[in-house]
Each structure stands twice: as structure tokens, then as C-alpha cells.
Image (cartoon, rainbow, N blue to C red):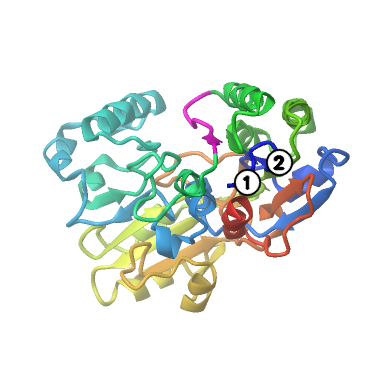
Amino acid sequence: MTDKKARTVKAFVFIDALGWKQAERYDFLREELPNRRPVEMQFGYSCTAIPTILTGKRPSEHGHLAFYDWAPDASPFRAMRFVAPFLRPRSFWRRGRVRNVLSRLVKRAYGFTGYFQLYSIPLERLPKLDYCEKRDMFAPGGMGPIPNLADTWGAQGLRWHVSDWRRPEGDNFDIARDLLAKGAVDRAFVYSAAFDALQHDCVGRDEALRPKVEAYADRVRSLHDALAASGRPFELTIFSDHGMTPLRGTADIPAALAATGMVWGRDYACAVDSTMARFWWLREDSRATAEHALADMPGRWLSRAEMEENGIWREDCKFGDAIFLADPGVQFCPGDMGVKPLRGMHGYDPRDEDSLACWLSTAPVPARVRRVCDYFAAMTE
């Protein structure tokens, strides 16, 4: 095995929603991280990108596209069919604070170790839905049977550290800095999620975003100093999963479908995420009816070729028989993820300029790093 003192230390900082446009606008750490490239995001959301980053696999392989999928025969929530009809009035159970408490109770009852949130899913539909993130994806074995980052670094005989996503991001930076300064690890993955929430609320608002970007710059410089103090050769890289697109309009998918007279769970099933509606056809004529209902909506139906290109086509149609994608800037509200639009959103066409992620590094950017799914190979080579 290579002598630990000579082995290059590599630290990777994942800043959720630090898009290419934001990195360039604020000239983020250009002097410290001069090797830079825009990166095509993974189709979907952070819940899609993170398992892609941690495994190098795309959704068609790792099975994570959006949180909830139609799965009436495999739903872990089937017992809730006895409870949901009594959760009245519905307006009470749709309140954000109530949902947060209920989410914690459900997570504990089912023993989920990953991130779990009910969002605005109608509770009466829950017994026919499955949830993708039941396990802690970051932990060893968390993406089994697919090896994740922790599994791979461990198998390579490296001393590694992966941040605890439950901790405040400040703690994650501090813990990584101390480990790097001591020379206690060969690889570090630092997780930071707060910028995503800030951008959802404040995209385009320089007075809110610039201080946060500057704070990140200070924290990254402290990691750089710790690496330099360790006396070992090192590489420091920041990457993201997507950017953020300002709100330009909304569309009410549930209302359009309700007007057709079709019944959810009998004629069709649909998961209305913030930027895409995923459909499962339960009757032969349901597709034509839904296509007519959405004909004037600001969006488009993805072809099978596009789904295959974006790594989201599966023969078992786990992610849907069809997907209707919103135009950039349009949010589907109300929907299963929320009843009100946010100032910014992501999850549009991966090639849209607002969606581009970034790779910023002290080392030359590997030629193969063009898409988010390429990060894993660069981190584990």
C-alpha cells in the first residue's frame, strides 16, 4: 500500500444548488479553485442527484427519481388505509407544522433511517405509494446492493470521512477541517445543503445570497489551510448538483385532471412534483384524456428517447408510464410537494442554463466530468 504520508489527500465539498451561474456571478473562489467547468445536472431533484453522486449510477439503475412512486402492491404504508379516512378535517392535516410532526412519527414507526417527509401528499393516497429513501444513503451499505462512496473508499483501503447529513453544515465543515488538519483521513466528503433552501426563497436576491456565498468561501479556505498544514499533497474540489431557476409562472395540474372526471387510483395514478407530473395509466383511454387535459399547460411530454438519454427510463415503469415536464420557471402548484410556489425551483431540463451545476478544483478537471453522474469516478479513481 502507498505510504500514507505520500498519498494525495482529496477533499470534496458538495454545496447543494451552487449552480454554474451563481459560481460565476460571485466569482466564487476563482483564485483558490482555478480549474472550473459547468456540469450537466442529473434529471430530477436533489433526491435524484445525491444517490447518483454517491454511486455513479443513474436513476434507472439506483432507483431514485422522486420520493414517491405508484406501488399499490408494495407500499410500506398499506396499514395507513385504516387510519387515513379518519384524519379529518383535511385542511388541518395539510398544515406544514402538522405534516412535520406526522412525518417524524411515520419515520419512527417504519424505522426509516434516510430523509423522510410527507410534504403535501394526500394521506388517503399514501397506502398505494412507495417511498424511495428508506435508508441512509451516505452510510456504508446505504445504497445496497450498489456500492456507495463509503463502501468504495473502504474497499480501497482508504481512511475516509463522509459528513452526517443530519448535522448543521457548520459542524460538518468544522469536523472535516479538524480531521484534515490532523492528517487523519485520505478522503473527505463534506455535505452542505443550506444554500438550496436559501435559493428556493431568495434566488436572484443578491443581498441575501452574497453573504452566504462569502461565508462558504471562508469555510472552504479553512479546509484549504487545514490541508496545507497537514504537510501532504492534496486536492480540494467543490461541486454541486444543480442551479436554481426563478419562478416565472404556475400551472394547476390536479385541477386540470379533476375536470376530466377521471378518478385517481381507478383510471390513473399521478405524482405531481414541483416541475414534473408522473403518470401511470390504469385504463386504456386514460392517457389520451390526460394529454387532452394538459394540452395548453406550459410543458411537454418526454419521449422514451429523452427518458433513456436522461437515465430515467425503466422497463418496469417505476418512475411512471409517462412524464410531463414543466417549462423552465413554471411550477406545478398545488401539487404533492407543496401548495404554494417558491421563488426558485430546480428539476427542469438538465441542459437549461439555469440548471447547470459546477465543478471547481485546485486540480485539473478530469476530462470525463461532464455530468453529475461522472463525479463518482473522479472521487474514487
**Which residue is tagged 2?**
6
163 part of magenta stretch: yes
Relative to 173, residue 19 above or below: below
Relative to 212, residue 16 above or below: below
Counting every numbered tag in the picture gives 2
Residue 211 in view here: no
The one of 342 and 187 positioned closer to us in this rendering: 187
Q: Is residue 349 left or right of residue 73?
A: right
The segment highlighted magenta reads: 159-167
Q: Locate residue 122: give its quadrant.
A: top left
Q: Amino acid at mark 2?
A: Ala
**How far apart are the two marked residues, 2 and 1, measured between alpha carbons?**
7 Å
Relative to 376, residue 32 above or below: above
Q: Residues within 10 Å of mark 1 (few under 14, many from 20)?
A: few
The numbered disc on residue 2 is 1
User: Disc 2, disc 1: CB below 8 Å?
Assistant: yes
Residue 71 in view here: yes
Kindly identify the residue that appears in the image at 33 percent across and 55 percent down: 69
Kindly identify the residue that appears in the image at 22 percent across and 43 percent down: 124
Magenta: main secondary structure equals loop
